Amino acid sequence: MKISTILDHIDSRHMALPEFQRGYVWNRDQVRGLFESLYRRHPVGGLLVWATESKTAAHRGEGPLAPGVVKLLLDGQQRMTSLYGVIRGKPPRFFDGNAQAFTGLHFHLEDEKFAFYQPVTMKDDARWIDVTALMQKGTAGLGEFVTRLSTQPALAPKVGDYVARLSRLLSVSDIELHVEEVTGADKTLDVVVDIFNRVNSGGTKLSKGDLALAKICADWPEARDKMKAELKRWTGAGFHFNLDWLLRSINTVLTGEAKFLHLHDKTADEVQAALKRATKHIDASLNLIGGRLGLDHDQVFFGRFGVPVMVRFLDKHTGPLNEKERDKLLFWFLQAGMWGRFSGSTESFIDQDLEALEGDDGGLDKLLEQLRLWHGGLRVEPGHFTGWSVGARFYPVLYLLTRMGEARDWGSGLPLKASMLGKMSKLEVHHIFPKAQLYKHKAKFRRPEVNALANFAFQTKDTNLKISDRLPQENFPEFEASHPGALASQWIPMDPQLWKIENFRDFLEARKTLLAAEMNRRMEELLHGDLRWLEARAAVAPTAPTVLGGVTSDEEEEQLEALNDWVEAQGLPRGVVSFDFADPDTGEQRAVFDLAWPQGLQEELSQPVAVLLHEEAPMVAVASQAGYRCFTAVADFKAYVRAEVLAEAGSS
C-alpha cells in the first residue's frame, strides 16, 4: 500500500491507533533517519494492522472511526506518525507526544541531507528546502522552487539536478509499504496484545497493567487521560507515581485483590467509581503520611506499595478515623517501610495484607500481627542506623524524626517541623563532620563511615552554607551558646570529647543510640500506650549490615534526576532513585542501586535495569546476580534505551 494511501486512510479514520498503544516517543534523529532511508529507497519495514469492526474498536483520539472494518496499527505507529506529521504538517488525530520531533524538517539539495531548521545556517541558503512545504504544494509547486533557484546565478546551472532531487523527495509518498493484517473472529484483545508484544520484541511492550488499562479503555476511552491527570497532580506535589501503581489502588478498592486480572470483568461505571474512591483515599493517605509523619516528598516516601493497602482499609472503614485508628494505620505503614515489606514480592505481600483486612476478625490489629510474625521485633535498635547514603533504608526515618519531632535549625534556632518559605530555607542534608575533613584525616575514614546516616542532619540551605567545612568542635559551642538545646534537638551527643574528629567513630555509635531511642519513643506515641506490638524484640540484635552502594553527593543525585527526566521524555516510566534492593523473602536491605527499574523499562516484560554510577565491582556483581542489566555510565545506558527499548534501528 502506498504511503499516500495510508495517510488518506488515517484522514478518513479507516486507520487508527488501538487504545493500548503508548504515545509517540521518537526524536528528531529518528525522524531524520526515516526520511533519509525513504529518500535513498532503503527498506524501512512493513506495517502490521488489526482489522476489526469499528463499533468495537477501542482507539486513541477523539471522534468515531469510519463505519465497517477499520485497521488499527499494531506495528508502525512511530513511522506513520512521523510521516503524517511531516507530509501533512500536523499530528494525526491519535497523536500523544512531542510534535517538535517532526516540525521543521529540511532537505539540502546539494548534499542530499536532511536536518531540522537552524536559522543561522539555513535562512539565506535557497538550497535548504522545507520538506513539509514541498509536500503540501506537491508537483504543482515545483515551478515555484525552480523559479527561486533559477534567480540565483550560482545555482542556476544545477537546477536540472535539483528538480530531479525534489521529484525524488516528493515521490516518497508513492513508496509501497507491505501491510500485513491480523484478522478473524478469534482475534480477541488478549490475542492481539500478545501478537503486539511478540512483534515488538525489541520495542516497548505492554505490561499487565497496560493490558488491564486497555480493557478498561475499551469501555471508557477517557480512562487513561483521567488517570494521567491524577498522576500529574501528585507529581506537582512531589510524588512520582505511575499508572500501574494507581491501577493497583483502583484494583484494591474494586476487588480487594492486588492482581490485575481481577479488573478484567469490571464495567466502565464500576472502574470510574473506583477511580474516584481510590483518588480520594490516596489523597487522604498522602496527607496523613506527610502531615503526621513528615514524609512529604518522593525521596523519603518508602513503602509506596503500602498505599494500596491503606486505600482498601480507608474504603472499607465507615466514617472518619479517630486519632488512635489513624496513628495505628500510620504505625503499620511506617513499620512496613522500615523493614522492606514491599521491597521483594510486592504483589504477593499486598495480597497477604489485603486478606488480613477481610472478614469479621480482619482489621488493623490483624495487619500488625501479620507484620510482626513476618519480621519479628518491631522495635528499632541502634544497629539499624548503621546504613549509609540517602538510599539507606533508615534515611526516611531520620527525615521523619526531624519533621515529626522538635528538631531545630542550628543556625537560626527555628523549628524544622513547620513548612519554611524561601529558597534559603529549603531543608538540605548536612554532613555533621564534613566529608573533606574526614577523607584527609590520618584515620583514613571509609566512604560508608563518611556518609553514615548518623553523620547526617537536616539544616536549612542558609545554615548549611555558613557551616561549610568547619568541624563540630569549632561550631557546636557557638550553636549551643546562641540557641540552647538546638544540638540536642537533633540527637547530638553533648559530650564535647565526641565532637573531636579523632573520636568520630565513637560519635557515630553514641548518636545511633540516641536516634534509636527517639524512634521508639515516636512509635510508642503512635500506639497511644498499646505497646504490645513493640514488646517482642528481634531474636538477634542487629549487627552492622553489609549494604553496598548509594548516592553520596548532591551532584550525583542531580545527574540521576536529569537521566530520569530524559527517560520520561522518551515516553518510558521513571526509575527509582536510590532503589532499595532487598532479600525478597526477608525484606533485609542488601544494596542501594543509584537508579533502577526493577520491573524493567518495559514493565514486567523486560530485564530489570540498574544505573550504578561510581560503583565498584562487588556492587555491580550483586545487581548482575539478581538479574539486573547494569550500566556504570550514562552514555551507555542511553545507547541501550535507544537501541533495545525504543528500537531506533528497527521499525517499531
Image: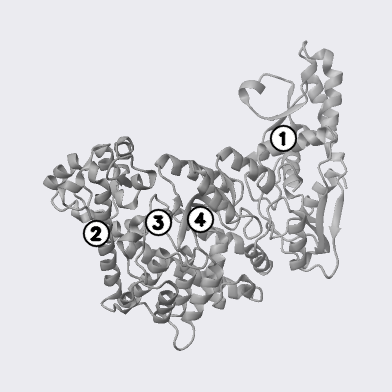
Find residue 514 and name its label.
Answer: 2
Find residue 300 and name its label.
Answer: 3
Q: Are marks 3 and 4 in contact (CB under 8 Å)?
A: no
Q: CA distance from mark 2 to mark 1?
A: 61 Å
Q: CA distance from mark 4 to mark 1?
A: 31 Å
Indicate which label's residue lies in the foreground, 3 or 4: 3
Of labels 3 and 2, earlier in sequence is: 3
Return the residue nearer the eye: 108 or 532: 532
Tell me the residue that label 1 is attached to. Answer: 32
Tell me the residue that label 4 is attached to. Answer: 232
Three-letter residue code for mark 2: Leu
Q: CA distance from mark 3 to mark 2?
A: 21 Å
Asked if residue 202 lies left or right of residue 315, the reply is right
Q: Residue at x 75, y 64 (%)?
A: 57
336 in relation to 76, above or below = below
Indicate which label's residue lies in the foreground, 2 or 4: 2
Q: Residue at x 85, y 58 (%)?
A: 181
